[in-house]
Amino acid sequence: MASLLQLDDLSVGVQVNGQSIKLIDHVCFSVAPGQILGLVGESGCGKSTVVKSILNILGRGLRFEGGAIQLEGKDLTTMSEAELSRDVRGGRIGFVPQDPMLALNPTFRVGTQLLEIWKRHGPAHLRRDTKTGRQSIIDLFRDVQLPEPEEAYRKYPHEFSGGQRQRILIAAALLCGPKLIIADEATTALDVTIQHQILGLLKKLAKERKVGILLVTHDLGVVNAICDSAVVMYAGQVVESGNVDSLLGSPAHPYTQALFERHPDREAQLSGIPGLVAQPGSFPTGCRFRPRCSKAQDGCATRSQHFQPIAADHSVNCILYDVDEEHSHAFAG
Ligand SMILES: Nc1ncnc2c1ncn2[C@@H]1O[C@H](COP(=O)(O)OP(=O)(O)OP(=O)(O)O)[C@@H](O)[C@H]1O
Ligand SMILES: [Mg+2]
C-alpha cells in the first residue's frame, strides 16, 4: 500500500560546544492510510523531536539536517511556511501535542478557538458556515466524552481539568477531517476508562475512515491494544521496527528486550533500564546503546546503522543480527 507519511533518513542536528550532533540520526519509517504506528522509547529518546520535524516546528537550537518527509508523496521539508500552515498543520495533519496548556490560549473560550481552526481548515464549502462548525465541534466534544458539550463550548481553558483539556485538543485534531493524526502522549494523562474510549475512537477513525495515526507513547498496553506496527527509538536512532505481533512477541534488539521483558503482561508503562539515555553531548560512537547493553561487543563501537530483516515486516539494527550484509540496508553516517 502507498504510504501516507514516509520518513527517509531524517536527521536533526543540535549544537553542542560549537559542534553539530545528530540528535535524530537517519530515522526511517512510514505510516499507511488506516495504519496505527506506535513510536516508543524512553524519555529523551527523541520521539517528540521526530514529531516536531514532521510539523516543521523544531524551534530554537535544533536544525533539520537532511532526509525527506513525505505526506501523500509531497516533501514537507521543501514546502513554504505559508503552505504548511494553510494546508498541513491542522488541515491534513491533526496534531495532539504532549502539553495541552501550551496549545490552548487561556484568554479565549475553547469553542471560539476551535471555530477559528474550522474557519481556516474546515471543508472548503463549509468554512464560512459557523453554525455547522459550532455543531461539529459540539459533536466532537461529545465523541471525546467531554461532559456537557454545549456548555463546554463557551468555557475557558482554565475551567477544565488537565484530562478534559487533553480531550479538547483531541477534538481539535479531529475537527477538519485529517488524513493523518499525530498524537504525542495524548492519552497518557487520562484515566483508564476515558483512555479506553479515546483509543477506541482513534481505532475507529483508522479502520473506518482510513486515517493514518502516529501514536507516541510510553505505554506498551496502548501499543498492544491499538497499534498495527511500532518503531522503537533509542537516543535518536531507530533500533527496531515491525508489526506489533512480531515485535512484542519476539523483541530482538537488547534495548527492546530490556524495555519489554519487565512487562510480560504488556500492560504496564516502559520502566527504567539501569543507566541513563545517552545525551547529545555524550553520544558514544557506533551503537548509541552500547554502554548500557549487556550484549555489547567490540564491533559495536564502530558499527554504522544496518537494518536486518528478521521476520516478515520486522527488522532490527544491531550487530547481533549482522549476518547477511548483502541484504541489509546500510547508510553512511
Ligand atoms: N531545543 C533543544 N535544544 C537542545 N536539546 C534539545 C532540544 N529539544 C530537545 N532536546 C534534547 O533532545 C532529546 C530528545 O528530546 P525529545 O523531547 O524529543 O524526547 P522524547 O522522546 O519526546 O521524551 P519524552 O518521552 O520525555 O517526551 C533530549 O535529550 C532533549 O534534551
Ligand atoms: Mg516527548
Image (tube, rainbow, N blue to C red):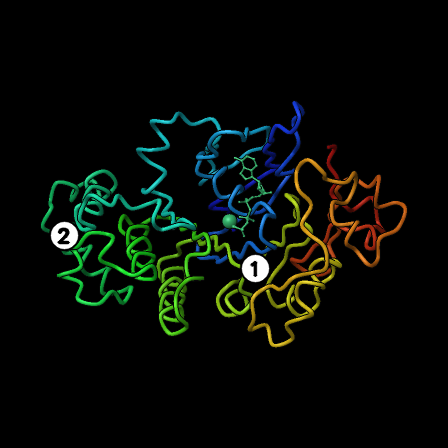
The residue beneath circle 1 is 229
The amino acid pointed to by label 1 is Ser
Report x, y in % for residue 243: 60, 61
Q: Nearer the viewer, residue 231 or 324?
A: 231
Residue 116 marker: none
Q: CA distance from mark 1 to mark 2?
A: 35 Å
Report x, y in % for residue 10: 59, 36
Q: Residue at x 24, y 43 (%)?
A: 117
Q: Residue at x 70, y 54 (%)?
A: 315
Report x, y in % for residue 216: 50, 54
The residue beneath circle 2 is 134
Mark 1 surroundings within 10 Å by alpha-carbon count, few (fewer than 14), some (14 through 19), many (20 or more): many
Q: Residue at x 25, y 41 (%)?
A: 121
Q: Nearer the viewer, residue 94 or 158?
A: 158
Mark 2 surroundings within 10 Å by alpha-carbon count, few (fewer than 14), some (14 through 19), many (20 or more): some
Q: Say which quadrant the C terminus sits in.
A: top right
Q: Nearer the viewer, residue 229 or 142?
A: 142
Report x, y in % for residue 191: 39, 70
Q: Assign a secondary structure to mark 2.
A: helix
